[in-house]
């Protein structure tokens, strides 16, 4: 029989990827495969630049299920942006704002979250991987 790692993800507030445009970052109801594998990789100490470790993680399949309806929360941020032509590869955001002077744009961005999240999941592989299930 195939071995599985079964898990629960629970939290007072979370955001699960979704559309990530410049002015709006949405959230899905459940985490996507990449988010789950990212958590597993972080727990195992596999960094993004570790090509062997990342390849081993891709050998796993993931299933998730929403176990409790979460409540949506929308947050608004007022941010200042610097026109690309004015930024000229600054080392820090502060330096970019300095260089821009009064030539900055102010905009409102939207972030979506889910509150009272409870998600169940399972992880399994078809061959050897970095995780002993």
Image: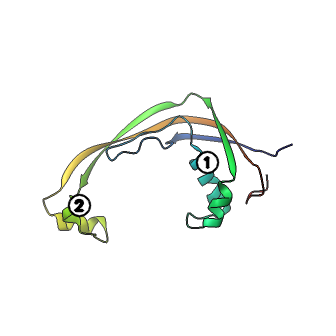
Q: Residue furthest right?
A: 1
Q: Of residues 21 and 117, which is closer to you in this image?
A: 21
Q: Residue at x 23, y 65 (%)?
A: 87
Residue 73 x/y as whole percent: 43, 34
Residue 51 x/y as whole percent: 60, 66
Q: Residue at x 56, y 37 (%)?
A: 30
Q: Residue furthest top?
A: 69
Q: Residue at x 61, y 48 (%)?
A: 36
* Left or right of residue 75: residue 39: right
Image label count: 2
* Left or right of residue 117: residue 74: left
Residue at numbered disc 2: 84
SS class, disc 1: helix
Q: Of residues 13 and 22, which is closer to you in this image?
A: 22
Above or below, comparing residue 89 to residue 129 in the picture: below
SS class, disc 2: helix
Q: Residue at x 74, y 58 (%)?
A: 129
Q: Residue furthest bottom?
A: 91
Nearest-to-viewer mark from 1 and 2: 2
Q: Residues within 10 Å of mark 1 (few under 14, many from 20)?
A: some
Residue 35 x/y as whole percent: 57, 48
Q: Earlier in the sequence, mark 1 or mark 2?
A: 1
Q: Alpha-carbon distance for marks 1 and 2?
A: 34 Å
Residue at numbered disc 1: 36
Q: Residue furthest left?
A: 102
Above or below, comparing residue 4 to residue 131 in the picture: above
Q: Of residues 9 and 33, which is closer to you in this image?
A: 33
């Amino acid at each position: 029989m195939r071995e599985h790692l079964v898990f629960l993800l629970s939290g007072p507030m979370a955001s699960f990827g979704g559309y990530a445009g410049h002015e709006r970052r949405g959230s899905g109801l459940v985490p996507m495969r990449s988010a789950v594998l990212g958590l597993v990789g972080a727990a195992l100490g596999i960094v993004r630049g570790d090509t062997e470790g990342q390849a081993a993680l891709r050998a796993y399949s993931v299933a998730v299920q929403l176990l409790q309806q979460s409540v949506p929360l929308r947050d608004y941020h007022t941010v200042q942006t610097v026109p690309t032509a004015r930024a000229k590869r600054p080392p820090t955001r502060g330096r970019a704002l300095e260089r821009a002077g009064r030539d900055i744009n102010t905009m409102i961005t939207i972030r979506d979250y889910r509150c009272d999240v409870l998600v169940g999941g399972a992880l399994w592989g078809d061959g050897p991987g970095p995780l002993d299930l």
